[in-house]
Amino acid sequence: MGKDKSIFLSLSSKVLILLLVALVIGILVVDDISAYIQGLLLGGIFTILKIKLMENTFKRAVEKEPSAAKALTNAHYMLRYVLTFIVLFVGIAVPSINGVAVIIALITMKLAAFWQGALEPKTPLDGSVEFVEWEDDEEESDF
């Protein structure tokens, strides 16, 4: 992945593709298409929001001390799970929203993450990869 391209754009585009596939399949299978589309929209919007929240959390965490970073990531992890529970509850409690579609939309984030991982080049385990140490051109090295 390029340095100028954020993980948010990459994962969000994969989530949108998976949501379109789920929409096409759902239109062929489901009786109440309107409720299904509303469920996909609710879950899809929330899934993309969760990806953005994770990206922001990780950007903030790398600037903190390890203990503060751990506390921040744990707090945001719990916040995302509480929000996910609320979205699931709304999707199941409201009769005009298909709860299964909400669950499918929430699962697309996991599928997009697996998809993203499958696209990244594998690192050989035999030690054939060399890591180049970065040196500042202005300062002399002790080595």
Image (cartoon, rainbow, N blue to C red):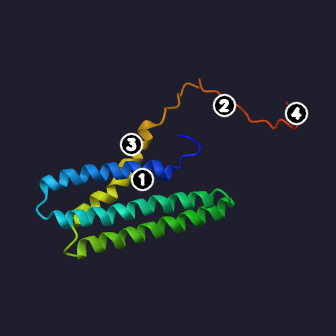
Whether residue 118 is situated above or below residue 74 in the rendered picture: above
Q: Give the labeled residue for mark 1.
A: 12
Identity, as a three-letter code, of the amino acid under mark 2? Phe
Mark 1 and mark 3 lie on one chain; the one further toward the N terminus is 1
Q: Is mark 4 on a helix, strand or loop?
A: loop
Residue at image position (89%, 34%) is 140
Q: Which of marks 1 and 3 is in front?
A: 1
Q: Is residue 5 left or right of residue 89?
A: right
Q: How far apart are marks 2 and 1 (CA)?
A: 31 Å
Q: Is mark 3 on a helix, strand or loop?
A: helix
Q: Is mark 2 on a helix, strand or loop?
A: loop
Mark 2 and mark 1 lie on one chain; the one further toward the N terminus is 1
Q: In this view, does 73 lie to the left or right of 42?
A: right
Whether residue 109 is situated above or below residue 71 in the rendered picture: above
Q: Nearer the viewer, mark 2 or mark 3?
A: 3
Res 72 quadrant in image: bottom right
